[in-house]
Amino acid sequence: MTFALVFAFLAAALAAIALVPLVRLFALHIGLVDQPDTERKLHARPIALAGGLAVFLSMLAGIFLALGFQTGWTYEIPIGFDTQPWLVLLGALVAILVVGLIDDKWILRGRQKLLAQCLIALVVVGSGTSLNEISLLGTEIPLGIFALPVSVLWLLISINALNLLDGADGMATTVGVFISGALAVISFLHDSPALNSITAFALCGALLGFLFYNRPPASIFLGDAGSMMVGLLVGVLAMWCRQKETTAFAAAPLAILVLPLFDSVAAITRRWLTGRSLYTSDRGHMHHLLNDKFGRVGTLWVVAAACTVSSTTAIASVWLQQSWLAPVGALLVLAVFVSTRTFGHSEFRLVAGRAWHLIHSFLLRPAVCEQQKHERVLKIQGDGPWQFVWEPLIDFAVRQELASVKIDVNMAWLHESYHATWRSVQLPEPALQSVVRIPLFAARGSGEHAEQVPIGRLEIIAASNADSLNRLSDFLEHAAELQLQVKQVVSRIEEIKRGDPISDLPFPWYQEHNSASA
């Protein structure tokens, strides 16, 4: 058995080293490449996609050769072995590869891709691969009627978690190597069916061979096809690895997947609490921040170190049958990332601010809720002088007795993201609110190629009464001046990025208005 696992790993790795150049040539020939952009891509030239196809074929080669080696090249199916789940999984992997290749070539809408993922996940779960209960520190919790939605949700999270990490040379591949390797070792330790362990070892070897071409500077990417395929396979293997006799398996897969899950949760949290669309692109993902701080090669070393800690503790939790080790290792990784402000610190502050506001609202008497104000300012990314816009807004809100002011700015191409809110502890009832939302614009590019693009929005809320229309009209009357102030701040940020002499900012729009009125 051990020799078959080693054979699967080595055969898949060598197959990937041989296949990737052919797949890369094919991708370049048909124009299946990832074009650089100024917003969120880190590469400066077109890079071949379809690396996932090479990984998939290499993995199949490793599995086929390992099974031949184990059975004496007779490929006899053991008595009682159920082939249906494996045939369904193979079909699902091919389907997710096709969806990913279509997306890589022609770009699908987010909802279209999500629908395809849901259908594929439903087929897998409907064939019998499901979580009927979960284990939490030794306690078995039956899911009952929630087994199907929880299982589908787990597969969707697995599919997209690794996909979100695939934005820097070698990062998703490195994480995939550790995840598949740890699952392979765990499967082997608990005598799971041989094909489970062989598949995990073959995937690990294929990804390691692919990393030879995907490491910085990468000449080929996994693409959506590869990252989604690996995510689906890892999600299914994690479900198959789980065994009733040990509770450690419940925590181990989560600990192994801690980095991609952390990135996904952080992205959802960041966009939800700032009011942005979940499909909004930004440069707040883990690979963006790590690349800015450590560089491309340094990013891989940091990721490898984090995965080593989480994978080692997960394996130890299974080997020693100490289920608490896996979550401790995962929490240690998260604590280091957040406390060092490497990643997750802004999202932590968003959650902490929202929690404090909720607790504070419970402690106040109803009579003072409308008078008490709560302000939260968060520079999610960058260090632009947004106080020249925000502080006059607060001054305006106080003078006009507004209930809430919110500004949210996201400029991926400048690595700049800013969010600030000022609001009464208790807002007026929705039916009694007068709301104004205006988009904020800035020029992207220079000269003839400059274009006005939306960079965020501003929202103000006033309690509906006889004077509310006058308050809102006063704001709208000077909205153009505010827009000019926003453009001045963006120009200042661009000057800082270019290293040009920094120009003076004009007086904030509302101070100018006050001076004129006086």
Image (cartoon, rainbow, N blue to C red):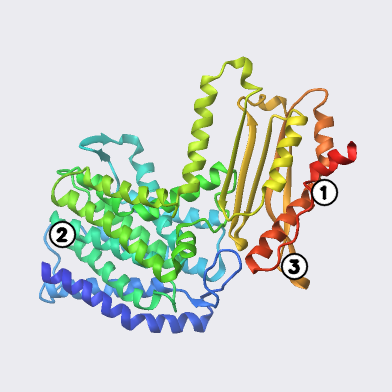
Q: Is residue 251 left or right of residue 52?
A: left
Q: Residue at x 73, y 58 (%)?
A: 442
User: In this figure, which residue is indicated by the disc labeled 3?
Assistant: 450
Residue closest to the eye, 8 or 418: 418
**Element at badge 3?**
loop
Q: Position of residue 28 (x, y in %)?
A: 50, 82
Q: Nearer the viewer, mark 2 or mark 3?
A: 3
Residue closest to the eye, 191 or 304: 304
Q: Position of residue 222 (x, y in %)?
A: 42, 70
**Element at badge 2?**
helix
User: How many numbered marks, from 0 up?
Assistant: 3
Q: Amino acid at mark 3?
A: Ala
Q: Which is nearer the N-term, disc 2 or disc 3?
A: 2
Q: Position of residue 46 (x, y in %)?
A: 54, 77
**Residue 442 visible here:** yes
User: In this figure, which residue is indicated by the disc labeled 2?
Assistant: 188
Q: Position of residue 513 (x, y in %)?
A: 85, 41
- Residue 495's tag is none
Q: CA distance from mark 3 to mark 1?
A: 20 Å
**Element at badge 1?**
helix
Kindly check if marks 3 and 1 are in contact, taking CB atoms under 8 A apart as contact: no
Q: Amino acid at mark 1?
A: Ala
**Residue 435 visible here:** no
Q: Which is nearer the N-term, disc 3 or disc 1?
A: 3
Reply above or below: 69 against 129. below
Kindly check if marks 1 and 2 are in contact, taking CB atoms under 8 A apart as contact: no
Q: Which is nearer the N-term, disc 1 or disc 2?
A: 2
User: In this figure, which residue is indicated by the disc labeled 1?
Assistant: 480
Q: Is residue 32 left or right of residue 377?
A: left
- Residue neighbourhood size for the residue with mark 3, other residues' Cα within 10 Å, grouped as few (<14), some (14–19), many (≥20): few
